[in-house]
Amino acid sequence: MLNTHNIYFRYDAENEFHLPDLSLKGGQNLLILGQSGSGKTTLLNILGGLLKPINGEVIIDNTSIYKLYESKLDKFRGNNIGIVFQKPHIITALTVRENLQLAAYFAHSQSGDRIDYILNELDIGHKAQSKIQHLSEGEAQRVSIARALVNSPKIILADEPTSSLDDVNSHRVMELLMEQAGKMDAVLIVVTHDQRVKNHISNRITVGVKK
């Protein structure tokens, strides 16, 4: 489902890194560990089609994503990749449901029933008509997860999904991510420096910037 080959990126001559070749089948999980500034988020952005590497290839479901033109890459990403950002990138002026409808719209997806299903799966169905500013931090993170899952992606990428959560919510968020990835037979990749996540995903690599 996901394969990478010879991925290389650098910000300048003194900060460069290589991503180890990956090969993950649907339903498999991977934890990418590293300290702040080690390049974890950069790697996630490369895998998510948001940042083109200087060298190398990212192949998702037999598609080499950086060979797609920009508009096709945007559509491919919307339909196949779900990203949970470190800070929930959700629109506060909209309700929970409207945020998910917007994600479905940009992916040209008809996901009315899917929205209800995902919200109920994440135990926030009763918050569908709530504005984001009325949610707790844990609930807002679940909305971010729901938005990433609404289009039934083949790849789920989570950037520090537990870093701002207490132990109870951290545990629940990881359970939800792994449970939903399993139900969709999707690849789940979590990048974090949160050592608590090690209790959930045993398959892991550690990255760092080469100086």
Image (cartoon, grey):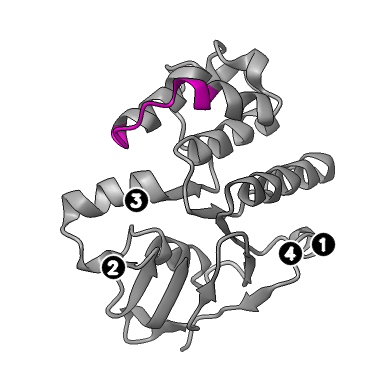
Q: Residues within 10 Å of mark 4 (few under 14, many from 20)?
A: some
The residue pinned by badge 2 equals 52
Gap in angstroms between the C-alphas marked 4 and 2: 27 Å
- Tag 1: residue type? Asn
Comes first in the chain, label 4 or label 3:
3
- From the viewer's perspective, is 109 left or right of 33? left
Where disc 1 sits, the SS reads helix
Decide: is 123 above or below 198: above
132 in magenta: no
- From the viewer's perspective, is 46 left or right of 180? left
Gap in angstroms between the C-alphas marked 2 and 1: 32 Å
Disc 3 vs disc 1: which is toward the camera? Answer: 3
Bounds of the magenta segment:
106-115
State the residue at coordinates (65%, 67%).
31
Comes first in the chain, label 4 or label 2:
2
Where disc 3 sits, the SS reads helix
The residue pinned by badge 1 equals 199
Q: Residues within 10 Å of mark 1 (few under 14, many from 20)?
A: few
Q: Quadrant of residue 26?
A: bottom right
The residue pinned by badge 3 equals 77
- Tag 2: residue type? Lys
- From the viewer's perspective, is 24 left or right of 127? left
Gap in angstroms between the C-alphas marked 3 and 1: 29 Å
Residue 173 x, y percent position in the rendering: 71, 43
The residue pinned by badge 4 equals 201
State the residue at coordinates (64%, 44%).
180
Disc 4 vs disc 2: which is toward the camera? Answer: 4
Furthest residue toward top: 129
- Tag 3: residue type? Arg
Q: Nearer the viewer, residue 172 or 111?
A: 111
State the residue at coordinates (75%, 59%).
197
